[in-house]
Image (tube, rainbow, N blue to C red):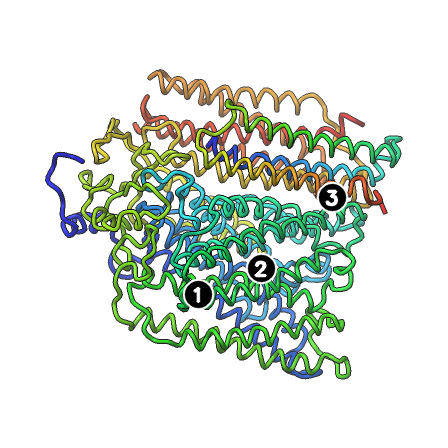
């Protein structure tokens, strides 16, 4: 504690509120960087997409309710089912849990915001703009129509000549910026922004789940982004990655898509499991049984899920041994899932459960998800899958897993955290009626559709033939489907009515033990008035006075003496205070950047490449404006963090938050690069018409330029870093780095010069590899120039050298990618 | 971060080994293998060697994680890391079983 007079809760609120509040009016919507506001907007947006996807589902059921229905033709039906899957997977499921996480995580961890508030805003606006584009495309009749996994050659120009497929490939890639951004936010926040004393074993279990999910997003999404990019390159420039006659292979798309697609199932399930692990113990008035086992199960599930992707490809003619590898892991993955289920059952066993509405939804989850899990084990068996593949059995199975395993727990979570989200106590009781309607409607629809699948009904057919034996099943499933829709509609109505007109509630009505219940409800913009000190996983149970102590400023940073947005960063393992992180103020830059980014992604749909390059320039300028606003022009030294502790600001540590963010962005980037190299090896090994007719001749200049460039770029930035810390001249080192990066670009240029981009899949792949090298060397070069500007403007000193460390990280990555990528490109020439 | 690495390395090694075995099996069944003058029988031996190496690596990590030099000072982290190392070992044994029990390129 400091010697200064103790603040009252009200005085502290009055001091903090002007610092953290949003801008007034509509301007505030566009400029906010606050996690509560963005989380709320995100939840509303994702719910809107759930409604849109649900309406499309009802159109599908209307079409299939009667034999040879004339409700819609196949062209429209193809768009409807493609957009139903696309919306539910990409525009609802992932954004909804991200939204909930953006809202809840800072409060749960006892910190004031997520690690990169502007990134939250940018991700949200990318999501909203991208989703709007997809919906407009649907209304305009040019929506994607090749199924939500867009297999070529169906999605290639030969069979999809319009812009429908381009909208999917570019639109979804654009929206995934939001997922990647949120994942980086979550990883850095969970690792570095927590209450003091919150060591890894004291993390709220939801934070553990979200940490695991975020790392999964960073490693699962890049293969699909790469697949979308190269399929778009094929469509736009005839680079034949998937055309067998030119050395391509459509199976490459399936590998890249399902490398994303199967982990995606667990990316969706694990946040729901996190919600259950938070809500269930509170409903059972106990603590989670087997916390360590549950963490280990979540991590196991996450990693094992990356060894399953081929089980979506069992019918593609892959050799039996290959199938057996993936069948084995598909059975193995049931074990950690089972560990979690038994931990939850054990928690119920040791507690005294109360049947509140969130508990009802969790019980609905248990029944439905276990059934979906069992059919999952069935389709993990290769012989069974050969019979059921692409039938309605699979449609039924995936809905059991996704709705039972994701939507039901999320609804439980929404009802559980409704007081935190809205500040109100649930009053209207439509939720119970809605639950039973949903359960009856859901099982009436999808239990029956298993049967239709076993009778041979293929997925995605637009008519049910009379006499097929599926007519009655489909009629009953459609009636049940409408009951299900009414049930979900009632849930949304119930939540909305309670959110707007129910009476104000009291703090922590469930008597929960975690920190999101320690703040007034709904949470203030600054989340916690001071950063608490915790000693267990359930700090509110240990110390019921903690909310008052936090509000009075008795934790860290309890006095906003520097009049800026500050929070505490802690050590990864033990949660010990390490530095003070200063957050940015409200800004319009993320919103503008999202708009310009959308132009960059959407211009190629209409072949407006000049506009695309102009927009890319705009994004670059805005990114520099964004980064320039960080930092300080003066050394501040150690600052008072409260409780007698003095810490440096983030500008004066070696590895600032920007370094951590870059590290995890580069993790995703490296997975994309690894997927590209996998594609290169896959085509060379498996695709027809290889080896290519002409192999790139390595020569001497390319490798010499690459090696010299690598040495100069990496050595130069290290010299500059050392000079900055020794108060010397960093210019020579930075100029050497620039020269090295230019040499890497020239080395990549020899690959362009020696190949023809559309001659063969080999040439096309080398162009993408060389393009990747040029792109990263270019980014690193821009960062060096940026660093030069920062030095000139006084942002860098012997204490403030974090920017140089960030640039060093990017240069090292560019160098490594160049050596591996160009080495791989030249290797066949050397061997031949 | 060292503790996060302790937790994540065994399963990461498993997925790397899994990818390597699957990749090698793809190469063995491709024209590249035959062009190099190698037989399917040699391919199976290569897969078995790789599989055994992966198991040995997992066993080595079990041993290393118990050494004071590599063990976590936090008991909870040490326990979770040990559980995950066992999971990785079992996953290696189970997922590589097809190397000795199924046809190679049919």
Residue, x 29% and y 73% (percent of image)? A501
Tell if the residue under mark 3 belongs to the same chain as the one under mark 1.
yes
Q: Is A444 left or right of A96, judged from the image as shown?
A: right
Return the x and y of residue A670 as percentages of the image width and height.
57, 37
Label 2 crowd (10 A; few <14 / some 14-19 / many >=20): many
- Above or below A806: residue A244: below
Q: Closer to us: mark 1 or mark 2?
A: 1
Q: Closer to us: mark 3 or mark 1?
A: 1
Q: Residue furthest left?
A: A5
First in sequence: mark 2 vs mark 3: 2
Q: Give the numbered dot on residue A359.
A: 1
Q: Is A414 left or right of A265, judged from the image as shown?
A: left
Label 3: state its secondary structure: helix
Label 2: state its secondary structure: helix
Tell if the residue under mark 1 belongs to the same chain as the one under mark 2.
yes
Instruction: Give the spatial CA distance, label 1 vs label 2.
Output: 41 Å
Q: Which residue is mark 2?
A: A167
Chain of the residue where label 2 is placed in the rendered structure = A
Q: Give the numbered dot on residue A761.
A: 3
Q: Give the numbered dot on residue A687.
A: none
Q: Split into 4 quadrants, where in the image is the N terminus of chain A?
A: top left
Chain of the residue where label 3 is placed in the rendered structure = A
Whether residue A568 is visible: yes
Chain of the residue where label 1 is placed in the rendered structure = A
Return the x and y of residue A177 as percentages of the image width and height.
49, 50
Return the x and y of residue A554 as percentages of the image width and height.
20, 42
Instruction: Give the spatial CA distance, label 3 vs label 1.
Output: 54 Å
Residue, x 70% and y 43% (percent of image)? B94
Residue A423 in which image quadrant: bottom left
């Amino acid at each position: 504690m400091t010697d200064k007079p103790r603040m009252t809760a009200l005085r502290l609120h009055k001091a903090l509120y002007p610092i953290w509040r949003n801008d007034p009016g509509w301007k505030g919507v566009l400029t906010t960087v606050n996690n509560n506001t963005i989380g709320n907007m995100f939840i509303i947006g994702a719910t809107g997409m759930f409604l849109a996807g649900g309406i499309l589902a009802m159109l599908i059921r209307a079409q299939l309710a009667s034999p040879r229905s004339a409700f819609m033709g196949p062209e429209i039906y193809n768009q409807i089912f493609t957009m139903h899957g696309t919306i539910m997977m990409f525009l609802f499921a992932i954004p909804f849990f991200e939204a909930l996480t953006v809202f809840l995580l800072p409060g749960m961890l006892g910190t004031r915001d997520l690690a990169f508030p502007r990134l939250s805003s940018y991700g949200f606006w990318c999501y909203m703009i991208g989703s709007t584009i997809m919906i407009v495309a649907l209304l305009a009749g040019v929506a994607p129509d090749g199924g939500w996994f867009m297999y070529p050659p169906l999605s290639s120009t030969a069979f999809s000549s319009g812009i429908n497929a381009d909208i999917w490939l570019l639109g979804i890639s654009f929206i995934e910026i939001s997922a990647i951004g949120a994942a980086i936010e979550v990883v850095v926040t969970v690792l570095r922004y927590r209450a003091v004393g919150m060591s890894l074993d004291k993390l709220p279990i939801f934070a553990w789940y979200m940490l695991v999910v975020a790392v999964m997003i960073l490693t699962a999404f890049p293969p699909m982004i790469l697949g979308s990019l190269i399929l778009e390159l094929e469509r736009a420039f005839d680079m034949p990655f998937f055309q067998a006659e030119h050395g391509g292979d459509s199976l490459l798309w399936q590998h890249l898509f399902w490398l994303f697609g199967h982990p995606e199932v667990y990316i969706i399930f694990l946040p729901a499991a996190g919600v259950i692990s938070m809500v269930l113990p509170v409903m059972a008035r106990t603590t989670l049984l087997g916390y360590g086992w549950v963490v280990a199960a979540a991590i196991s599930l996450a990693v094992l899920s990356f060894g399953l992707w081929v089980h979506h490809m069992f019918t593609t003619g892959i050799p039996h041994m290959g199938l057996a590898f993936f069948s084995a892991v598909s059975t193995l993955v049931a074990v950690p899932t089972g560990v979690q289920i038994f931990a939850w059952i054990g928690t119920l066993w040791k507690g005294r459960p109360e049947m509140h509405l969130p508990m009802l939804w969790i019980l609905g989850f248990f029944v439905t998800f276990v059934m979906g899990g069992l059919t999952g084990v069935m389709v993990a068996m290769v012989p069974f899958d050969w019979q059921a593949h692409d039938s309605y059995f699979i449609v039924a199975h995936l809905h059991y897993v996704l709705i039972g395993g994701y939507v039901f727990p999320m609804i439980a979570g929404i009802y559980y955290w409704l007081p935190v989200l809205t500040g109100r106590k649930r009053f209207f009781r439509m939720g119970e009626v809605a639950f039973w309607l949903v359960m009856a409607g859901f099982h009436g629809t999808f239990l029956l559709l298993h049967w239709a699948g076993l009778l041979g009904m293929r997925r995605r057919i637009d008519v049910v033939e009379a006499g097929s034996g599926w007519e009655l099943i489909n009629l009953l499933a459609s009636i049940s489907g409408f009951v299900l829709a009414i049930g979900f509609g009632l849930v949304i109505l119930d939540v909305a009515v309670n959110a707007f007109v129910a009476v104000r509630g009291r703090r922590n009505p469930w008597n929960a033990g975690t920190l999101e219940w320690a703040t007034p409800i709904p949470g203030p913009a600054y989340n916690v008035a001071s950063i608490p000190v915790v000693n267990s996983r359930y700090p509110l149970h240990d110390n019921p006075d903690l909310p008052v102590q936090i509000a009075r400023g008795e934790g860290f940073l309890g006095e906003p003496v520097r009049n800026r947005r500050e929070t505490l960063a802690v050590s990864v393992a033990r949660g010990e205070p390490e530095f003070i992180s200063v957050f940015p103020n409200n800004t319009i830059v993320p919103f503008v950047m999202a708009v310009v980014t959308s132009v960059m992604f959407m211009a190629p749909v209409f072949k407006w490449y000049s506009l695309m390059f102009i927009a890319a320039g705009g994004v670059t300028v805005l990114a520099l404006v964004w980064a320039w606003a960080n930092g300080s022009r003066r050394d501040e030294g150690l600052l008072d963090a409260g409780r007698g502790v003095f810490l440096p600001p983030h500008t004066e540590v070696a590895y600032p938050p920007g370094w951590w963010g870059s590290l995890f962005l580069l993790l995703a980037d490296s997975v994309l690069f690894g997927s590209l190299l996998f594609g290169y090896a896959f085509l060379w090994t498996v695709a027809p018409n290889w080896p290519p007719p002409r192999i790139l001749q390595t020569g001497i200049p390319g490798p010499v330029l690459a090696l010299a460039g690598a040495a100069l770029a990496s050595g130069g930035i290290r010299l500059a870093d050392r000079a900055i810390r020794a108060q010397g001249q960093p210019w020579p080192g930075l100029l050497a780095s620039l020269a090295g990066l230019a040499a890497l670009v020239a080395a990549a240029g020899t690959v362009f010069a020696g190949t023809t981009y559309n001659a063969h899949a080999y040439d096309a792949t080398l162009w993408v590899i060389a393009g990747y090298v040029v792109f990263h060397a270019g980014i690193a070069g821009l960062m060096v120039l940026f660093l030069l500007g920062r030095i000139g403007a006084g942002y860098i000193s012997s204490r403030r050298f974090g920017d140089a460390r960030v640039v060093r990280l990017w240069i090292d990555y560019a160098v490594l990618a160049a050596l591996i990528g160009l080495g791989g490109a030249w290797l066949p020439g050397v061997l031949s | 971060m060292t503790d996060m690495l302790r937790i994540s390395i065994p399963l990461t090694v498993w997925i790397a080994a899994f990818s390597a075995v699957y990749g090698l099996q793809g190469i063995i069944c491709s024209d590249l293998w035959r062009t190099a003058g190698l037989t399917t029988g040699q391919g199976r031996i290569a897969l078995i060697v790789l599989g055994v190496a992966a198991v040995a690596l997992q066993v080595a990590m079990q041993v290393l994680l118990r050494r004071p030099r590599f063990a976590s000072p936090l008991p909870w982290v040490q326990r979770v890391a040990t559980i995950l190392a066992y999971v990785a070992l079992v996953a290696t044994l189970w997922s590589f079983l097809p190397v000795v029990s199924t046809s190679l390129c049919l």
